[in-house]
Image (cartoon, rainbow, N blue to C red):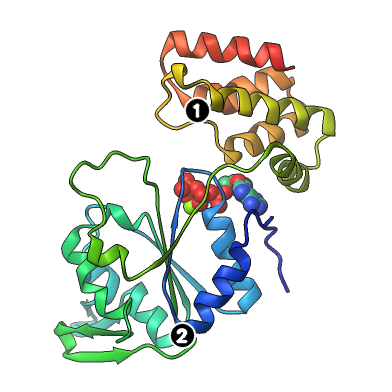
Amino acid sequence: MNITYYREINGEIDLFKCCYQQQLPLLIKGPTGCGKTQYVTAMAEYLQRPLIKVLCNEDTTAGDLLGRFLLKNQETIWQDGPVTRAVREGAILYLDEIAEAREDVIVALHPLTDHRREIYIDKINETIRAPSNFFCVASYNPGYQRGIRDLKPSTRQRFVSISFSYPSIDVESEIVIQLTGIPIRYVTCLVKMASAIRSQAELGLRETVSTRLLVNAALLIKAGMDPRDAAYMAIAEALTDDKRTLDSLKQLISFSF
Ligand SMILES: Nc1ncnc2c1ncn2[C@@H]1O[C@H](COP(=O)(O)OP(=O)(O)OP(=O)(O)O)[C@@H](O)[C@H]1O
Ligand SMILES: [Mg+2]
C-alpha cells in the first residue's frame, strides 16, 4: 500500500518502473525541495522494496558506505555499511547528493552501477553480487556550484537521468492542497507568489522558492498564522539574509495576499 503521496509531473513513475525492471541505475537532477526524495520514497513503497538512504558529503568514505571493522567486547567484528546492506537485502539504495561525495568514493561504486552489479570489499576480500531486486537511484542538485568537482562522465554515463524542476501552477497547487488541506484561496496566493519570485532573476537568489517552502508556509497558515507572516517566515527568511532582497520579497508577499 502506498502511504507517501507523490504527484507525477512528467512520466517519471513509468521511468522508475522501467529502470527497475531493466536494472538501470537512475539519476535524478533537480533543485532543493522539488520532490526528489518524495518520489523515491513513493516508488520504493509502490515496488514494495525497503529503501536505504545515504546522504553523501565530502567526508563520506568508502568505509562509511561499504562497512568497517568495529571493536565489540574485545572482539573485532565486521559491520556492513548501508550500501553493502542494500546489496545483500536487494533493497532500493538512494544515494542522495551523490555529487558531494569524493571521486574515489563514487568510483568505488562503479562496478555496482554498471552491468557487473557487484561490490568488492577489500577489507574482507569479498565480492557481493547484487540480486535482481537491488536498485540504485541517486540524486544531485546541479545548481550548487562545485567548480571542477562535478560528476565525472564515467559516473554520469552509468545512470539513466531525469531532470526535475518546480511544477506548473496547477500541479503545485494540487500538491500543496493534498499535503496541507488549507483553503484553496491561500494556495492560489502562495503558488502565484512563488511563480512571481521564480521569474525574478534580479532578486539574485542562490536557489529560488521550492515546493517545500510553499508546503511549510501552508502548514503555518493551517496552524492559524497570518498568511503574510507565514509566507515571510517560511519563504522569504529561508531564501536570503540580505536585507534589500528581504524587503523586495516582503513587497511581493503583500501584493500576493
Ligand atoms: N511531485 C510531488 N508530489 C508530492 N509532493 C511533492 C512533490 N514535489 C514536491 N513535493 C513536496 O515538496 C516537499 C519537498 O520534497 P522533497 O523533500 O522530496 O524534495 P527534494 O527534491 O528531495 O529536496 P532536497 O534536494 O533538498 O533533498 C515535500 O513536502 C514533498 O512532499
Ligand atoms: Mg531530498
Q: Nearer the viewer, residue 149 or 58?
A: 149
Q: Is mark 1 within 8 Å of ligand 1?
A: no
* Residue located 23% across and 52% down the image: 58
Taking the image as drawn, is residue 144 in sight? Answer: yes
Tell me which label, 1 or 2, sits earlier in the chain.
2
Could you tell me residue 244's position as x and y percent?
45, 8
> Is residue 228 rendered to the left or right of residue 78?
right
Q: Quadrant of residue 134?
A: bottom left
Hey, which quadrant is residue 72 in on the image?
Answer: bottom left
- Mark drawn on residue 90: 2
Q: CA distance from mark 1 to mark 2?
A: 38 Å
Q: Residue at x 71, y 44 (%)?
A: 171
In this view, 68 is above or below 130: above
Residue 29 image position (x, y, % from top left): 43, 53
- In the rendered view, tell whether residue 25 sits above or below residue 205: below
Amino acid identity at mark 2: Gly
Q: In the rendered image, which residue does mark 1 sit on?
A: 238
- Answer few, some or many: residues within 10 Å of disc 2's Cα (few below 14, many 20 plus, some between 14 and 19): some
Please state, as top left, top right, bottom left or bottom right, where the C terminus lies in the image: top right
Q: Which residue is at a point 83% across and 28% down the rendered structure image? A: 185
